[in-house]
Image (cartoon, rainbow, N blue to C red):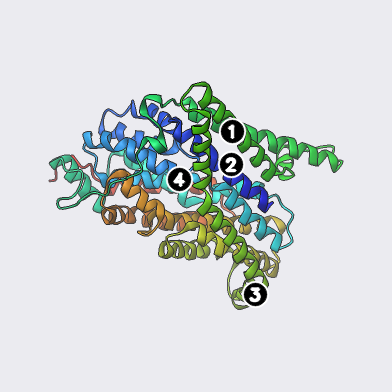
């Protein structure tokens, strides 16, 4: 499975390289920018662009920031607000969608963690089940939409927005805005050749191919087991997600390459070069992934999880594990600036911890599963917190550069929003759901609370102060 994850991740990088160089990602974003006519529509268009380029956080950041910068400047939207929206729709989106450059890494860590407690559950199935419990990234996306829809802000962001609206200054006086040097046709293709279908079709092939692969391998597995009555959940649980992702990404590479050559966007050699550029962009991710597996093996040999279990298992209620783990992962990822590194360190520890503690308290299989879903989602969501707002996180830096914003101004204005969302998620999401409360109702309540805070405490930047 490790080899399949590595090959899939490389192939996915190749797909991203092809659709970026062909202008596919730019074409997708161009569709949304046509509707940016007012401040509100410009903000919503930026948010929507971030959602549409869901398959890779780096591509998302660089494309949306560079594309929307000139548009938001004309609409008197501060660079701080632009960089916040760009940052908030990069890692939070890529971490929760069913197909992205994150999926192989996340599923791989979950698989190894499940093996450590003797579970034979399908890691991709568990990944899907944890999505409703990923309160921070989901709530951040909702929070950004509410901010843009109501056109209200508070704290340092309100000050930045008032400066842009009232004085026409999208950056603070005396600031030399960071410039993104990656906005070149060598990476994103020429704007004249930017066609949305060059991005949509390969990604559609990838998604449909994966779903077909999951269904086909799942059906084959349950039939081999002699199961007569089975449903969709049984099919997914018995599917081979790694093989499905691998073949779907290979098919997407072929489709993207053929489309580029047939349209004469690039020659065959240039297409192959673009594919290799995409592969090369995944080298760091592969290095982190390999080291993550090494860390997992080391912690297992050193019995790190067993040591932690022996210290705290008798003194902690399992139902508080999700919120504690979210807080630990959020602080760790913020301090280190790496979400993947935090996941790699924490996942091999928290799954055995949750398994042992729930057994110690004689939890039923249903209640044990609820806690395990909670701790897995807390690792994934807490790690995204640091990736989103840490001043040394790569996506935070890229968001500043792509948006042309002073880096520390970006960090200073978005941090209150990130902390507020995280606190609400812990109180209304992580704690109640561990006691059996519906995660879907938690998300609704979180949205209502965040909307209320924005409506009652936020102010419109163009409003006259009394």
Is 4 positioned to the left or the right of 193 in the image? right
The residue labelled by disc 3 is 302
Residue 350 located left or right of residue 363: left
Disc with the residue nearer the chain's start (4 vs 1): 4
Q: Is residue 368 visible?
A: no
Which is more N-terminal, label 1 or label 2?
2
Residue 180 appears in view = yes
Residue at 64 percent across and 77 percent down: it is 310
**Quadrant in the rendering for residue 163:** top left
Disc on res. 11: 2
- Sequence order check, earlier mark of 3 and 1: 1
> In the image shown, does 321 or 71 lie closer to the viewer?
71
Q: Residue at x 37, y 52 (%)?
A: 396
Q: Identify the residue at image location x=53%, y=43%.
A: 13
Q: Rounded to the nearest whole Å, what is the CA distance between mark 3 and mark 4?
A: 34 Å
Q: Position of residue 165 (x, y in %)?
A: 18, 40
């Amino acid at each position: 499975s490790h080899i399949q994850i590595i090959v899939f991740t490389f192939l996915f990088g190749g797909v991203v390289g092809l659709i970026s160089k062909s202008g596919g990602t730019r074409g997708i974003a161009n569709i949304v920018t046509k509707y940016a006519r007012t401040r509100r529509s410009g903000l919503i268009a930026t948010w929507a662009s971030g959602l549409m380029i869901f398959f890779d956080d780096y591509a998302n950041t660089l494309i949306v920031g560079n594309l929307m910068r000139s548009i938001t400047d004309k609409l008197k939207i501060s660079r701080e607000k632009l960089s916040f929206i760009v940052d908030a729709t990069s890692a939070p989106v890529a971490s929760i969608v069913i197909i992205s450059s994150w999926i192989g890494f996340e599923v791989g860590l979950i698989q190894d963690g499940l093996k450590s407690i003797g579970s034979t559950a399908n890691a991709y199935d568990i990944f899907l089940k944890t999505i409703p419990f990923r309160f921070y990234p989901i709530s951040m996306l909702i929070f950004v939409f509410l901010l843009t829809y109501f056109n209200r802000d508070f704290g340092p962001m309100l000050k930045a927005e008032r400066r842009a609206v009232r004085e026409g200054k999208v950056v603070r006086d005396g600031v030399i805005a960071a410039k993104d040097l990656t906005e070149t046709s060598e990476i994103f293709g020429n704007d004249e050749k930017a066609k949305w279908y060059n991005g949509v079709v390969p990604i559609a092939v990838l998604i449909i191919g994966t779903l077909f692969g999951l269904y086909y391998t799942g059906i084959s597995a349950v039939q081999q087991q002699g199961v007569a009555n089975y449903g969709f959940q049984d099919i997914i649980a018995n599917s081979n997600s790694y093989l499905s992702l691998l073949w779907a990404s290979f098919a997407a590479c072929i489709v993207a390459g053929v489309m580029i050559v047939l349209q004469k966007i690039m020659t065959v050699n240039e297409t192959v070069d673009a594919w290799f550029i995409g592969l090369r962009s995944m080298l760091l991710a592969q290095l982190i992934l390999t080291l993550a597996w090494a860390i997992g093996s080391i912690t297992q040999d050193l019995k790190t999880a067993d040591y932690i279990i022996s210290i705290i298992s008798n003194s902690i209620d399992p139902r508080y594990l999700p919120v504690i783990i979210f807080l630990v992962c959020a602080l760790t990822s913020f301090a280190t600036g790496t979400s993947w590194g935090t996941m790699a360190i924490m996942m091999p520890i928290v799954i055995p911890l949750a398994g042992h503690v729930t057994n110690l308290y004689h939890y039923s299989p249903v209640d044990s599963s609820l806690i395990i879903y909670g701790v897995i989602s807390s690792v994934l969501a807490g790690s995204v917190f640091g990736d989103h707002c840490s001043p040394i996180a790569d996506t935070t830096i890229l968001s500043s550069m792509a948006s042309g914003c002073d880096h520390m101004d970006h960090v200073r204005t978005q941090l209150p929003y990130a902390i507020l969302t995280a606190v609400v998620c812990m109180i209304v999401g992580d704690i109640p759901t561990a006691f059996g409360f519906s995660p879907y109702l938690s998300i609704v309540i979180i949205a209502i609370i965040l909307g209320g805070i924005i409506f009652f405490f936020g102010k419109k930047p163009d409003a006259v102060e009394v």
